[in-house]
């Protein structure tokens, strides 16, 4: 009987292989690491829960009007109407303006640093631009208000004079100074997001296959035509990811915008030189100090909307950046 | 050989090359007559690829690059004050070691990319695409998928696409920097055949590590050699048969017989 057993074919059991901790110390290391990682998830979850609890009654009472309407009446006694539309659109308008201004600057910086400047100077330039990202936004806001506004006002006036017929640069009353506009806020935001877009673009540029660039130059390409037809098309997904990362920051920007923008619920769809606009985060900051308990909840709801938007934008950005890295 | 077109003569006179302070080539004198294929051979680091890049002004893209001497294309110095770099690179095309088709462009766009990059007008685009691909012997393989991405092609096909891309600029001289070193034997053979056909209408300079290849494709051969602290230079230059079968210098003899390098 024993012999028949041995003649049966052996079936190897399939095991799942996993790289685990290599020592007792490793075990604690693994626990520490996963605790830290989980902590980040838990923290985001807790913030989201807190905002949801605070915001839910408001969202329920206001319905879709909270996002699309444009009235904000939260004084005591009267019927409370809280509709965020103009602030929400204002955030987007400013972010787009900022990105349109920042992207060419960032691509130029990245190109200079990777392809033109000598290594030593490129390093210094990189440090300086990264330093710009570390500046507190209050500082940029104050600089924007006192130093930059007069300059940008000049540009705004030129734009309005020469392209005022175009709705984007149209102003109802050109005799008034063009202060407090989404254009100014857009510039401030641009200054703040240039470092992010530059650093992502720089990374993507430096990973480019030098063979492609040499090939293009050997075919008689100029510096500019090679940038336009080879470097940018081959880095486009990465640059787009950098732009979205910048967008995430632009939409959430608060203090700096408050200095240079007049917040108004009279919605401004596209006249970027018009002295009124909106920004969700700045609105929260502006109202926070004097808000009634009811309005406080409304501001929390505004915070929730902002949180969700930035979460989506950032996730999308990371997805795109990672994918374009993986493709190399 | 009935359709032979008299091609340009390229000549390098007293070429010395530096990377920063380090001299890598000294006093190279070579003449590349029209319709001839010249092979540049020698061990790694002897400066043959660097020399090749001085022939279409690609060397100057390296920071700290230095050069002495002159390169004449039909008698005109390509480094002269009146020479236009873009014109030089159009007249002297280049094919690289690693196939480098532009990944974001289709096969057709790759062929036309040189004209776009150099800001030249495109006339009879379809005809130009077909002729260029035919001259690089890849037309039959890609004629039904000209709008496909270039990266969909095999390595050998990509390299022939790159040859076709250079040919679309109608260069007088074609420089090839180890064009087959990343390819399989079949693709290598086809490119060697293409080189033979192309020499009927242009001048070709090819850097190769492959002795057999040099013997198969070239009419004349230059043997480069460098030593520690001694910049590279040409040890021997002559008809390919002579360099391989009857070398004058013992170092050439040792190298072509595989004793070093």
Image: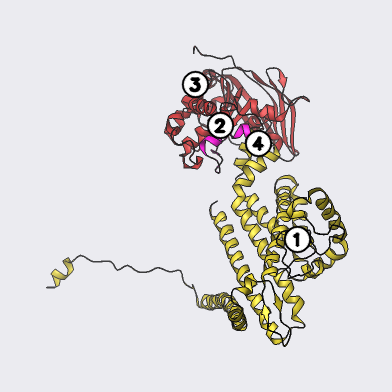
Observer-nearest of A17 and A249: A249
Disc 1: which chain? A
- Report crowding for label 3: few under 14, some 14 to 19, many 20 or more residues within 10 A (C-alpha): some
- Which mark is in front, 1 or 4? 1
Q: Is residue A89 left or right of residue A45?
A: right
Determine the CA span between mark 3 and mark 2: 16 Å
Same chain for mark 4 and mark 3? The answer is: no
- Which mark is in front, 2 or 1? 1
Disc 3: which chain? B
User: Is the C-beta separation of discs 3 and 2 under 8 Å?
Assistant: no
Residue shown at 67%/43% (left/top)? A227
Disc 2: which chain? B
Location of mark 4 (residue): A217
Looking at the picture, how far across and down is residue B75, in whole percent? 70, 17
Q: Is residue B160 left or right of residue A276?
A: left
Location of mark 2 (residue): B165
Regarding residue B49, the answer to whether it shows in the image is no
Q: Which residues are magenta?
A: B95-117
Location of mark 1 (residue): A186
Determine the CA span between mark 1 and mark 4: 37 Å
The secondary element bearing badge 1 is classed as helix
**Relative to residue B124, is residue B116 depicted above or below?**
below
User: Is the C-beta separation of discs 1 and 4 under 8 Å?
Assistant: no
Reply yes or no: does residue A306 show up in magenta: no
Q: Sequence order check: which comes first, mark 1 or mark 4?
A: 1
- Report crowding for label 2: few under 14, some 14 to 19, many 20 or more residues within 10 A (C-alpha): many
Determine the CA span between mark 3 and mark 1: 60 Å
Chain A: drawing colour:
yellow
User: Is the C-beta separation of discs 4 and 3 under 8 Å?
Assistant: no
Chain B: drawing colour:
red
């Amino acid at each position: 009987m024993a012999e028949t057993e041995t003649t049966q074919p052996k079936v190897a059991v399939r095991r799942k292989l996993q790289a685990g901790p290599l020592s007792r110390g490793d075990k604690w290391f693994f626990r520490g690491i996963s605790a830290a990682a989980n902590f980040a998830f838990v923290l985001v979850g807790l913030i989201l829960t807190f905002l949801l609890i605070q915001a839910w009654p408001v969202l329920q009472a206001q319905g879709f009007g909270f996002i699309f309407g444009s009235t904000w009446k939260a004084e005591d006694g009267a019927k409370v109407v809280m509709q965020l539309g103009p602030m929400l659109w204002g955030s987007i308008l400013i972010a787009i303006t900022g990105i349109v201004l920042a992207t060419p600057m960032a691509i130029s910086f990245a190109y200079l640093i990777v392809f033109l400047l000598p290594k030593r100077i490129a390093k210094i330039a990189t440090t300086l631009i990264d330093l710009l990202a570390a500046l507190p936004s209050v500082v940029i806001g104050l600089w924007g208000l006192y130093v930059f506004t007069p300059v940008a006002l000049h540009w705004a006036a030129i734009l309005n004079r020469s392209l005022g017929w175009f709705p984007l640069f149209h102003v109802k009353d050109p005799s008034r100074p063009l202060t407090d506009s989404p254009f100014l806020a857009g510039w401030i935001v641009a200054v703040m997001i240039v470092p992010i877009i530059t650093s992502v673009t720089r990374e993507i540029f430096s990973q480019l296959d030098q063979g492609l660039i040499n090939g293009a130059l050997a075919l008689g390409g100029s510096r500019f035509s090679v940038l336009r037809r080879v470097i940018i098309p081959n880095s486009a997904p990465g640059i787009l990811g950098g732009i979205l990362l910048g967008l995430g920051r632009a939409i959430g920007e608060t203090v700096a915008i408050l200095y240079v923008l007049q917040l108004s619920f009279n919605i401004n769809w596209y006249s970027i030189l018009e002295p009124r606009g909106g920004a969700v985060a700045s609105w929260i900051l502006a109202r926070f100090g004097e808000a009634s308990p009811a309005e406080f909840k409304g501001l929390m709801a505004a915070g929730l909307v902002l949180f969700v938007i930035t979460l989506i934008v950032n996730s999308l950005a990371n997805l795109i950046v990672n994918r374009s890295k993986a493709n190399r | 050989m009935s359709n032979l077109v008299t091609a340009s003569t390229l000549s390098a006179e007293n070429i010395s090359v530096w990377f920063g302070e380090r001299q890598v080539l000294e006093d190279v004198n070579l003449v590349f007559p029209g319709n001839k294929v010249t092979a540049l051979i020698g061990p790694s680091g002897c400066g043959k690829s660097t020399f090749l890049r001085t022939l279409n002004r690609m060397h100057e893209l390296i920071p700290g690059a230095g050069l002495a001497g002159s390169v004449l294309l039909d008698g005109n110095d390509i480094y002269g004050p009146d020479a236009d770099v873009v014109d030089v690179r159009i007249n002297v095309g280049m094919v690289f070691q690693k196939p480098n088709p532009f990944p974001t462009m289709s096969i057709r766009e790759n062929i036309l990319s040189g004209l776009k990059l150099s800001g030249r007008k495109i006339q009879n685009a379809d005809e130009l695409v077909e002729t260029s691909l035919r001259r690089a012997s890849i037309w039959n393989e890609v004629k039904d998928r000209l709008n496909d991405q270039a990266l969909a092609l095999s390595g050998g096909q990509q390299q022939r696409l790159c040859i076709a891309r250079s040919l679309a600029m109608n260069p007088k001289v074609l420089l090839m920097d180890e064009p087959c070193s990343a390819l399989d034997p079949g693709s290598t053979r086809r490119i060697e055949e293409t080189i033979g056909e192309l020499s009927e209408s242009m001048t070709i300079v090819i850097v190769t590590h492959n002795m057999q290849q040099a013997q198969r494709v070239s009419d004349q051969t230059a043997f480069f050699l460098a030593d520690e602290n001694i910049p590279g230079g040409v040890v021997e230059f002559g008809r390919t048969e002579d360099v391989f079968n009857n070398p004058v210098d013992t170092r050439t003899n040792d190298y072509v017989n595989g004793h070093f390098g």
